[in-house]
Image (cartoon, rainbow, N blue to C red):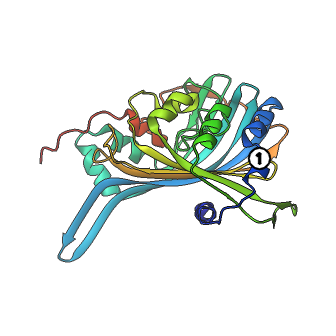
């Protein structure tokens, strides 16, 4: 899945074109996908840099804290939005010893992040969210949620919301288009259109119901998110990337745990129908940390008593 990041980086460098007016309408295409209750498979990849760091000059050693996440999933759409979603999410941690030191001081966020390492499955359908936690075999029904909830938390921008996508396109500061190329999977000729720009967490919270649910708090700060959206010559979503590096030390971010986050989602295999069913599950408590937006709700960092 490293190809996802590489592809987005390459698209950023592509030269612009004078034929922007010939591009398909990506917002109208999303509306059409919703109207016909389409389904799609997704693939995602990302990571975060924390503020955890240790260095020993003799002998020279360094430990930094970070995490990577990746996975696949499906989304089922309807005229009103996503009605169901499911993902399998794999988390790899770096610098666990530093995270454990913070958890031992009573920091619930670091303890929750440590517990999230490994493979988690999530399903949201018919108003409920379900979890299959790392190293467990039984599903838990962990609370009420929208159909999009399982798929949005690491990917915070939902371009399948027409109003959100329209806002991004209207405020984009860069546009590119590739030459016609042959799709290796299908053999059809296609070209990829790219818009990129920035939006603040505050503005995203205002326009996107999906982000409001994922954030779980209006106190999201005003840091800017850089985003890049790719779609094909039919207007179908292809990829969405975003990243930010904190500047305003939003609660739960910056010197308070997380310095930067980046993620990319690929949309592929648009289908007429996707089947997502609720698993057999017992009621249970949702994990403290199961997606990147959980940092926005993290409590104050315990004072260092050392």
Whether residue 265 is visible to the viewer of this picture, yes or no, is no
Q: Is residue 185 above or below residue 278?
A: below
Residue of label 1 = 236
The answer to whether residue 110 is left or right of residue 212 is left
Please identify the residue farthest to the front as the structure is shown: 18
* In-image side of 5 versus 160 (left or right): left
Query: Which secondary structure, mark 1?
Result: loop
Residues packed near mark 1 inside 10 Å, few (<14), some (14 to 19) or many (20 plus) = many
* Front-most of residues 54 and 135: 54
| Residue projecting furthest to the left | 306
Q: Nearer the viewer, residue 206 or 152?
A: 206
**Image quadrant of residue 129?**
top right
Please determine whether, in this image, residue 279 is positioned above or below residue 14.
above
**Residue drawn at the location 53% of the way across and 52% of the way down:** 263
Residue shown at the point (44%, 39%) measured from the top left: 289
Residue 51 visible, this angle: yes
- Looking at the image, residue 89 sits to the left or right of residue 239; the answer is left
- Residue 31 location (% of width, % of height): 76, 33
How many marks the image carries: the answer is 1
Q: Position of residue 179 (x, y in %)?
A: 77, 66
Please identify the quarter of the rendering in which residue 58 is found.
Answer: bottom left
What x and y, as percent, mark residue 158? Answer: 61, 38
């Amino acid at each position: 899945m490293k190809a996802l990041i590489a592809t987005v980086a390459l698209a950023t460098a592509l030269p612009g074109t004078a034929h922007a007016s010939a591009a398909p309408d990506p917002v109208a295409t999303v509306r059409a996908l919703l109207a016909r209750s389409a389904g799609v498979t997704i693939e995602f990849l990302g990571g975060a840099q924390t503020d955890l760091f240790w260095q020993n000059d003799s002998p020279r050693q360094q430990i930094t804290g970070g995490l990577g996440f990746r996975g696949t999933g499906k989304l089922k759409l309807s005229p009103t939005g996503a009605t169901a979603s499911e993902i399998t999410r794999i988390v790899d941690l770096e610098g666990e010893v530093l995270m454990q030191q913070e958890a031992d001081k009573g920091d619930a966020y670091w303890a929750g992040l440590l517990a999230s390492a490994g493979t988690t499955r999530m399903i949201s359908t018919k108003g409920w969210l379900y979890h299959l936690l790392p190293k467990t075999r039984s599903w838990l029904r962990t609370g009420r949620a929208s159909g999009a909830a399982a798929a949005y938390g690491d990917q915070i921008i939902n371009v399948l919301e027409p109003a959100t996508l329209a806002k991004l396109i209207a405020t984009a500061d860069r546009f590119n288009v590739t030459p016609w190329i042959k799709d290796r999977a299908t053999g059809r000729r296609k070209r990829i259109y790219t818009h990129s720009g920035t939006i603040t967490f505050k503005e995203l919270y205002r326009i996107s119901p999906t982000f409001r649910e994922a954030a779980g708090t209006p106190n999201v700060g005003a840091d800017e998110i850089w985003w890049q959206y790719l779609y094909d010559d039919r207007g179908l979503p292809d990829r969405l990337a975003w990243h930010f590096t904190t500047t305003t030390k939003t609660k739960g971010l910056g010197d308070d745990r997380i310095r930067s986050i980046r993620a990319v989602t690929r949309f592929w295999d648009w289908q007429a129908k996707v089947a997502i069913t609720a698993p057999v599950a017992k009621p249970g408590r949702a994990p403290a940390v199961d997606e990147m937006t959980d940092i926005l709700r993290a409590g104050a960092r315990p004072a260092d008593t050392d």
